[in-house]
Image: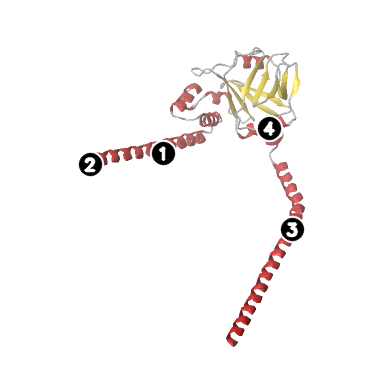
Amino acid sequence: MKKNILKNISLTLTFILAMAAFAGCGSSEDENMDQSADTPTLITENTSDTNSDTDSYVDDEPESSIDATELTVIFGDGGAPFIMHLYDNDTARAIARHVGTADWRLPIYHYDDYENWEVMQYYDIPSRYEIPSAPETITEEAAGTVYYSEPNRIILFYGDAEVTSEYTPVGYFDNTEEFRSAVENNPVLEGWGNKIVLISDGDLLPIEKRKIMSFNRPDAALIQNLKDAGCDTQTIENFMSDLHKGKEESSLKQLAIHRKKLLDSIHKEQKQIDCLDYLVYQMRKSNI
């Protein structure tokens, strides 16, 4: 009987101690919850400091990447540079910012087979670039004016026109005879069938050096060589851009990366061939 009483007392004490420990854990969690409840207030207070730091960082960026007022444009690989003056709006700033990270070498596939081609050209920008716009109805365009048209298209008027459309003004060229002649006489790439327009933040090689390509080969031949080697469009664009800037080491590095991909592919296919050969061997050995 005494044993049962002692056993009951022991179980009761164990239960009480367990409840006390549980209560302690609960109060600890409540304290943590109370502390976490105060956390947003602290974060909110620090948010202004963080934004302040971010604003300071943005202000410290190079002016050319934020407030560029002009870009350099070349019609054809061997052409003379012309200055495109930029308007002060988000669209122009976005274009300048993207061009500041990598020159644009845009192909012109259509130049004489659409309405008003005698006074205007359009250049398609790769879709990976995000460009904001604020289109407005334009009914008259002066020669030299540049607009942005969604999605991702630059419109250049090299002659006076009366074309009604929704455009975002981007900038303008000085309407000189040399400018109009450069646009109109932009040569078609031999063996390629399209024209080229180069847009840069100004960091381009002199005209004479830009004309001298690696191994003294013209662009069309180089591009065809890259295509025959299995290079994709992006690799070709990056390679040609670096080549025009005189970054030969960077160009060679891109070729080395592509060569490694080709070798990896060959090794993978060779392994697959070995597996097939082994299967054939096993089948013949077993007279299957």
Marking on residue 264: 1
The local crowd at label 4, few if under 14, some if 14 to 19, many if 20 or more residues have their Cα within 10 Å, is many
Determine crowd level at label 1: few under 14, some 14-19, many 20+ residues with C-alpha closer than 10 A.
few
First of labels 2, 3 by sequence position = 3
- Do the CB atoms of the residues marked 4 and 3 lie less than 8 Å apart? no
Q: Give the number of the mark in front: 1 or 3.
A: 3
Element assignment for label 4:
helix
Q: CA distance from mark 1 to mark 3?
A: 54 Å
Alpha carbon distance from label 2 to label 4: 68 Å
Q: Comparing marks 2 and 4, which lies closer to the viewer? A: 2
Q: Earlier in the sequence, mark 4 or mark 3?
A: 3
Q: Which residue is mark 4?
A: 94
The relative height of residue 39 versus residue 149 in the rendered view (above or below) is below
| Residue receiving disc 3 | 37
Q: Which residue is mark 2?
A: 285
Q: Dot 2 lies on which element?
A: helix
In the picture, measured across the screen, residue 91 lies left or right of residue 246, that is right
Q: The residue tagged with tag 1: helix, strand or loop?
A: helix
- Separation of marks 4 and 3 at Cα, in angstroms: 41 Å
x 32%, y 40%: residue: 275
Q: Nearer the viewer, mark 1 or mark 4?
A: 1
What is the CA distance from the residue labelled 2 to the residue labelled 3? 74 Å
Q: Locate residue 88, reporting x and y percent.
A: 75, 30
| Front-most of residues 223 and 152 | 152
Q: Amino acid at mark 2?
A: Lys
Circle nearer the viewer, 2 or 3: 2
| Residue 153 % position (x, y) | 64, 24
Q: Looking at the rendering, which quadrant does residue 4 occupy?
A: bottom right
User: Disc 1 or 4, which lies upstream in sequence?
Assistant: 4
Q: Amino acid at mark 1?
A: Asp
Disc 4 versus disc 3: nearer the observer: 3
Closer to viewer: mark 1 or mark 2: 2
